[in-house]
Image (cartoon, helix red, strand yellow):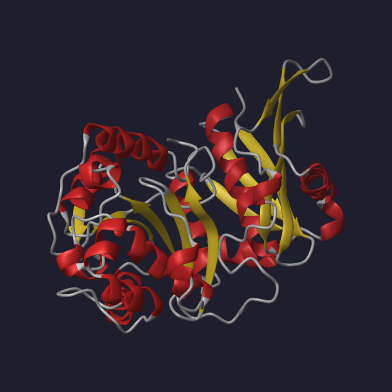
Amino acid sequence: MTARVLIEADGGSRGNPGPAGSGAVLVDFDSGAVLAEIALFIGVATNNVAEYRAVLAAIELANEIAPDAKLLVRMDSKLVVEQMSGRWKIKHEGMQDLSAQMNKAIGSRDVTFEWIPREQNSKADSLANEAMDAESSVIRKFVGEPGTSTINVVTLASQVTAADLEYNPELPSSVRAPRDVTKKLTTVILVRHGRTPLTETHKLSGRGGEDPQLSELGRDDARKVAVELARVGKSSTFAKFAAPTAIISSPLARTRETAQIIGSELGLPVVTLDDIAEISFGKWDGHTNPEVAAAWPEQYSSWRGDVKIAPPGGESLEEFDLRVQRGRAEILAEYEGQTVVVVSHVMPIRGFLKAAAVADWPIYWRATVAPCSITVLRFWGDEAAEISAVNHTTHL
């Protein structure tokens, strides 16, 4: 049985932030036998993040292959060594989160951190570069006696794909985006409600109208999107995002029903917010567009060309936009730093897109938003934003 494990860990980033890799080697301290090697590709990140991730991955692997051994972690990163030893304060929130994950992995284990010169950490450095060169992740576990070991190679299911290569988990991904943001990243996963009888017959259905429930097809839509959202932070297209911690819904029946199905799957309660309800169509509610054009020809024509004109008894686009942006601001303030699922309607989702893209009015008729589609936006308050996915429907 291995009594002591030496961990040598390192991380690097080609750009800082840029494509980053973490490397670690686990060695039986007494015999010198290599127990495992880790080459972890983590997408776009800083050197510090890559170094923290290297140690975290190594400790998690040590928990698996040598759960009772004492651990000695050697690194050429004085920052990580001093912070994890408790001698330096961790000021960066991203590092605080990684430190918390590392402390959770350590638990009650006996772990010592020690700084070494870079030239003594060449093996971990080469593993980090292996991950960056290959743009993939691998764990090699060595089994058997020293010199006669067999190798169990595990290719990580969470390896980064080309689609995630330029993703930055903390800051806006583009190098031209602001880097001096003060607000925490809030990831907003927007979901349109499932189909209703009015959706299926192409009738207008807004705030203050008939307020229909989901149809059977709509409930099926909601179940499918709920399963997809349960994978966020774990697997599938959205594995890179943090798992949702809150669900906010429009107060209308179809959104509340969709949100409750999602909430049951995710184990989260649903909070309603009136400001993200659909635009009001007033007297036009329940009619098709051709019916409205025939019954209110002059008003309909004027409404289509002027954001200040409202349907009789309804809201103008200008009035609606003020309301939905107020709701968006409330969500970003209340749930700053979290991943939130927002279950809403076509027009509010387009309103969120308008804010993220700093777009003008045409965004309200240029973005397709299908029932139970997923749109993912990342906001740093109003300081920066990023559009990660629009109208994602492969789960349906």
Is 277 on the left or on the right of 165, as rendered? left
Residue 82 % position (x, y): 60, 66
Residue 128 vertical placement versus 338 (above, below): above
Which residue is depicted at the point 14% across and 54% down?
A: 211
Which residue is depicted at the point 14% across and 60% down?
A: 209
State the quadrant of the C terminus. top left
Which residue is depicted at the point 43% across and 77% down?
A: 381
Residue 170 % position (x, y): 55, 65
Is 142 on the left or on the right of 243, as rendered? right
Is 287 on the left or on the right of 84, as rendered? left
Q: Nearer the viewer, residue 376 or 337?
A: 376
Residue 87 % position (x, y): 55, 70
State the quadrant of the N terminus. top right
Residue at the right extreme of this rendering: 119
Q: Nearer the viewer, residue 158 or 113?
A: 158
Number of marks drawn: 0
Residue 261 % position (x, y): 24, 40
Residue 79 visible to an observer of this rendering: yes
The quadrant where residue 291 appears: bottom left
Q: Nearer the viewer, residue 225 or 277?
A: 277
Residue 28 visible to an observer of this rendering: no
The quadrant where residue 19 appears: bottom right
Which residue is depicted at the point 50% across and 55% down?
A: 390
Residue 250 vertical placement versus 172 (above, below): above
